[in-house]
């Protein structure tokens, strides 16, 4: 079974478009490695990314939103360590 990625975003903050863009970026990069990407509405300023229920990014903990490159690297390292990310691998 392929992994499930969940992006939980704050509806009060209107972060749906940011979450949807992140989902698109991830799906484009991991189209065969991921089984599902879910957008989950929340409140209270939440923006969290979970992979198979493991929290891999929290806006609250980091104090900022993840960069697309950063999120792709976190996902790749867990589900497809051998996968090259092209320009996202560069410093």
Image (spheres, rainbow, N blue to C red):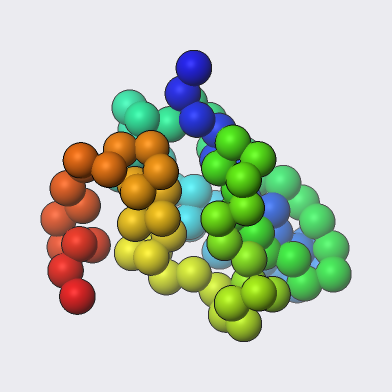
| Residue depicted at x 84% and y 63% | 43
Question: In the image, residue 40 lies at what x, y percent?
Answer: 72, 46
- In the image, residue 89 above or below residue 80: below
The C terminus lies in quadrant: bottom left
Q: Is residue 33 above or below residue 83?
A: above
Q: Position of residue 56 (x, y in %)?
A: 55, 55
Q: In percent of the image, x 38 and y 65: which residue is there?
A: 70
Comparing 46 with 80, the one in front is: 80
Confirm whether residue 16 shows in the render.
Answer: no
Q: Residue at x 57, y 61 (%)?
A: 57
Indicate the position of residue 88 as horizontal and vertical percent values: 23, 62
Who is closer to the viewer here, 45 or 82?
82
Left or right: 87, with 24 as reference point: left
Q: How many marks?
A: 0
- Corner quadrant of residue 27: top left
Which residue sits at x=59%, y=77%?
62
Q: Residue furthest bottom?
A: 63
Q: Quadrant of residue 71?
A: bottom left
Residue furthest top in the image: 1
Q: On screen, 84 above or below 68?
A: above
Q: Is residue 63 left or right of residue 11?
A: left
Q: Is residue 49 above or below residue 31?
A: below
Can the viewer see residue 74 in this picture?
Answer: yes
Q: Nearer the viewer, residue 20 or 52?
A: 52
In percent of width and height, residue 25 lies at 38, 52
């Amino acid at each position: 079974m392929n992994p499930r990625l969940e992006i939980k975003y704050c509806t009060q903050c209107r972060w749906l478009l940011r979450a949807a863009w992140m989902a698109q970026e991830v799906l484009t990069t991991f189209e065969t490695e991921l089984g599902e990407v879910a957008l989950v509405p929340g409140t209270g300023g939440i923006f969290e990314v979970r992979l198979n229920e493991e929290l891999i990014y929290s806006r609250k903990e980091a104090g900022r939103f993840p960069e697309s490159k950063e999120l792709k690297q976190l996902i790749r390292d867990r589900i497809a360590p051998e996968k090259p990310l092209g320009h996202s691998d560069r410093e």
